[in-house]
Image (tube, grey):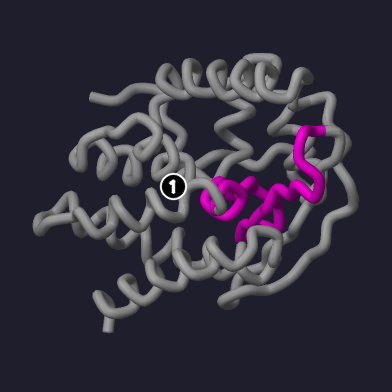
Amino acid sequence: MLAACSSSPAALPEHATPEGAVVSWFDAVDSGDVETASATIQPESLALIMGIENDISTAELSEYLSRGVPLDLQKSYWKSFSEGFTEFADKTLSSLTVGQADEFVSEGETFASVPVTGGPASGSVIIVRQRLDGSWEVDMVASLGDGFSKLLLDRYERLGAGEDESRIRLAYLEVVEPSLWAAMADGSFGDDFARTALTLLSRIDADNA
């Protein structure tokens, strides 16, 4: 049995704006506030990214997609995420400057591109998605698409047949597809990303034709 999962995170007051959601996420990751970090992230996008980074089994990924990633696993993940960024950038996530969001609609959903400055790369963005209640959550698939699109494609192409595989394919249809379209609409990631994203999108569409 999985305890302390995060499949339905409650919106926090700071999630009322795209910028607030990004600031909340940065602060929570750096401070080790796992509950807030979890509540700030689109839960299935977190499960997919963690699944790739940790090469978890199909059965585990299916369960995390349905029930949320257990908070004890998130604790070590966010700690590593924070330390890895600090080592790479020589500064903390929470020290970055969060700019004014640019909202847009992609595939019928509302997203926002939030510029982030002060890190090692110019033109960095965090892409957030609006929830049904009007609050905002960080979309990790869209935000990290440039580095994970090929891995997302590889994982999808290796899926076999079965109930767990069907659950993962559903997440690709409902979460990954709109996230990739949003990342392409934002335009920050370039042609290589777009080519890989379009290949994956064609696979998803073919499976759901």
Whether residue 206 is situated above or below residue 167 in the rendered picture: below
Whether residue 110 is situated above or below residue 63 in the rendered picture: below
Viewport quadrant of the N terminus: top left
Report if residue 17 is visible in the image.
no
Report if residue 64 is visible in the image.
yes
Residue 136: in magenta span: yes
Of 13 and 21, which appears nearest the observer? 21
At a point 41% along the width and 30% down the height, the residue shown is 5
Quadrant for residue 198, please give it.
bottom left
Residue 131: in magenta span: yes
Where does label 1 land, which residue?
44
At a point 45% along the width and 60% down the height, the residue shown is 176
Whether residue 152 is situated above or below residue 109 in the rendered picture: above
Q: Is residue 117 left or right of 184 when viewed as pictured?
A: right
At a point 67% along the width and 67% down the height, the residue shown is 110
How many badges with numbers are in the image? 1
Q: Is residue 157 left or right of 92 when viewed as pictured?
A: left
Residue 209, given in percent of the width and then of the height, sits at 27, 84
Quadrant for residue 191, please give it.
bottom right
Residue 57, given in percent of the width and then of the height, sits at 21, 36
Bounds of the magenta segment? 119-145
Q: Secondary structure at mark 1?
A: helix
Residue 175, given in percent of the width and then of the height, sits at 45, 59
